[in-house]
Amino acid sequence: MIYTNKISRAIDFASRAHENQKRKVLNYPYISHPLSVLFLVSKFTDDEDVLVASILHDVVEDTNTNSSDIEIKFGKKVRDIIDVLTEDNIIENIKERKDKQLEKFKKAKNETLLIKLADIIHNFCDILTVLEHYPKEIYLDVFGGNIKDKIKNAENRLNIIKNTWPENPLLPEAEMRFKDYKKTLERLNLIEL
């Protein structure tokens, strides 16, 4: 992986933006998530802007940062990638928000889909850790909602990414993590909820 001044600035920026945030249940500093996404993405590209976007992929959605801040500090390409990755929180209906996000993935560039799959893989890893090491009630409390809908949404997301870019090098790992997620839910008798 290349390590440039711009990547260093992005890590600093993301660390400050996510400073008081923790990963759900696991309670470790949130910055470990974008750094994990960076690690996965860096296995397949040395494009500086893509690496920067992988570090910053959640800052607009999860902090007080806006897209303009990203463009001013890191450039238009980084902003464009993050805009596709960011859910529109103005849409209150979660299903509508998720559906709009899926539509963006159908037109997304490969570099954006690479980041999204890295994000999905790391999120599945954390969720599997919660399912394996905490009482299932904690999973239901924190991640709650209709489990069948969660499975369907994850499957739709993966299928859209697969149809948009079938050669995505992270696709096999993402599909494996998804299968592990479903098997774990079945084993814990949660899939029927």
Image (tube, rainbow, N blue to C red):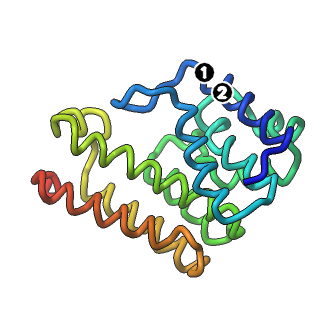
Residue under pointer 2: 15
Closer to the camera in the image, 138 or 4: 4
Quadrant of residue 143 within the rendered picture: top left
Name the disc covering residue 19, or none: 1
Dot 1, how many residues are within 10 Å of its Cα: few (below 14), some (14-19), or many (20+)? Answer: few
Q: Is residue 100 visible?
A: no
Q: Amino acid at mark 2?
A: Ser
Crowd rating for badge 2 (residues with CA inside 10 Å; few <14, some 14–19, many 20+): many
Helix, strand or loop at mark 1: loop
**18 left or right of 133 in image:** right
Q: Are marks 2 and 1 in contact (CB under 8 Å)?
A: yes
Residue 189 lies, in percent from the top left, at 10, 53
Which residue sits at x=58%, y=57%? Answer: 116
User: Does any portion of residue 81 appear in the rendered image?
Assistant: yes
In the image shown, does 90 or 2 lie closer to the viewer? 2
Q: Position of residue 156 (x, y in %)?
A: 43, 68
- The amino acid type, in three-letter code, at marker 1 is Glu
Relative to residue 19, is residue 120 depicted above or below? below
Residue at (33, 30) in percent of width and height: 25
Q: Is residue 104 above or below residue 13?
A: below
**Which residue shows up at 67% across the image and 49% down it?**
54
Q: Position of residue 83 (x, y in %)?
A: 71, 50
Picture coordinates of residue 118 (x, y %)? Answer: 55, 56
Q: Is residue 117 left or right of residue 136?
A: right
Q: Is residue 60 left or right of residue 3?
A: left
Measured Cα–Cα span from mark 2 to mark 1: 6 Å
